[in-house]
């Protein structure tokens, strides 16, 4: 089912993401991060993340959240995209990704700042990816 969205041609359906395959976790997001609300490293929401785990067997010792992030990041994704796809708060995902980067489980590609401003092309690509969700 989809909700209507107005555009210049009239109302059009907006596809809704599929429901999560796993039942909702009874664990609160802040419990997943051990109560931490800030990542150990500065992590922009437009930063790109790629998985550093090459094989499925490496996932068996990881938490379910780490496994999900590792699977999602087999394709390069932004931090914001990972948050949206996991349906978890951005702050929680930032903490998890920063922890995974410190353990060498993911690679983080921070945006290059030009005089304190993010790269416009990168932001446009992130926005385009978010619109496709």
Image (cartoon, rainbow, N blue to C red):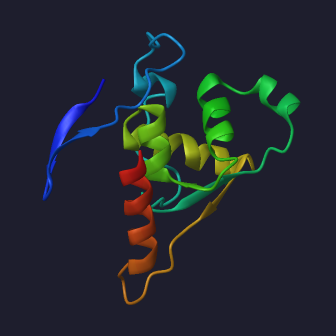
What residue do we see at 36% from left, 53% from top? 131
In terms of depth relative to the viewer, which is nearer, 73 or 5?
5
What residue do we see at 66% from left, 51% from top? 75
**Residue 5 visible in the current orientation:** yes
Q: Is residue 133 above or below residue 76?
A: above
In terms of depth relative to the viewer, which is nearer, 18 or 88?
18
Hey, which residue is sitting farthest bottom in the picture? 115
In terms of depth relative to the viewer, which is nearer, 29 or 37?
29
Residue 125 position within the rendered picture, expressed as x and y whole percent measured from the top left: 45, 67
Quadrant assignment, res 2: top left
The N terminus sits in image quarter: top left
Q: Is residue 24 above or below residue 93?
A: above
What residue do we see at 61% from left, 44% from top? 99
The C terminus sits in image quarter: top left
Residue 86 position within the rendered picture, expressed as x and y whole percent measured from the top left: 48, 33
Q: Is residue 49 above or below residue 54?
A: below
What residue do we see at 41% from left, 40% from top? 84
């Amino acid at each position: 089912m989809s909700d209507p969205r107005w555009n210049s041609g009239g109302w059009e359906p907006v596809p809704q993401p599929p429901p999560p395959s796993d039942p909702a976790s009874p664990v609160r997001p802040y419990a997943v991060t051990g109560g931490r609300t800030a990542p150990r490293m500065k992590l922009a929401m437009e930063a790109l993340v790629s998985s550093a785990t090459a094989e499925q067997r490496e996932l068996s010792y990881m938490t379910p959240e780490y496994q999900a992030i590792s699977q999602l990041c087999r394709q390069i994704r932004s931090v914001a995209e990972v948050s949206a796809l996991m349906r978890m708060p951005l702050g929680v995902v930032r903490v998890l990704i920063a922890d995974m980067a410190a353990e060498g489980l993911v690679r983080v590609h921070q945006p290059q700042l030009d005089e304190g401003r993010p790269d416009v092309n990168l932001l446009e690509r992130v926005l385009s990816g978010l619109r496709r969700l």
